[in-house]
Amino acid sequence: MRQAVKLDGIVAEGDTSFQKTLLAKRVQKCVEALDVLKLSNGKLKTVIVTTKWETFDLPSTANLDLF
């Protein structure tokens, strides 16, 4: 939307005006695509994944000299 506002502020004549119109249409298509993605993401269900971690305790008599 910021890009659309910036384009509106540009005064153009001739070929530049045509290019401004093309860029405005391009920005509008991007905004519409983002709106569609926003709606489709809102329909997704939230999935929560939890993991029960398993811990291992060393025996108290273990020899910890590895090297």
Image (tube, rainbow, N blue to C red):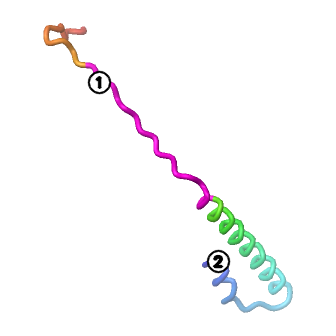
Q: What residue is shown at x 40% (from left), y 34% (from top)?
A: 51
Rendering coords of residue 49 (x, y %): 46, 41
Left-right relation of 42 to 55: right
Left-right relation of 47 to 26: left
Segment colored magenta = 41-56
Q: What residue is shown at x 78% (from left), y 77% (from top)?
A: 25
Left-right relation of 53 to 3: left
Determine whether the residue tagged by mark 2 lies in a helix, strand or loop.
Answer: helix
- Tell me the tag on residue 3: 2
Q: Amino acid at mark 2?
A: Gln
N-terminal of the pair, mark 2 or mark 1, is: 2
Does 40 lie within the magenta span?
no
Determine whether the residue tagged by mark 1 lies in a helix, strand or loop.
Answer: loop
Rendering coords of residue 42 (x, y %): 59, 61
Circle 2 or circle 1, nearest the eye: 1
Report which quarter residue 39 is drawn in.
bottom right
Residue 6 in the image: above or below residue 38? below
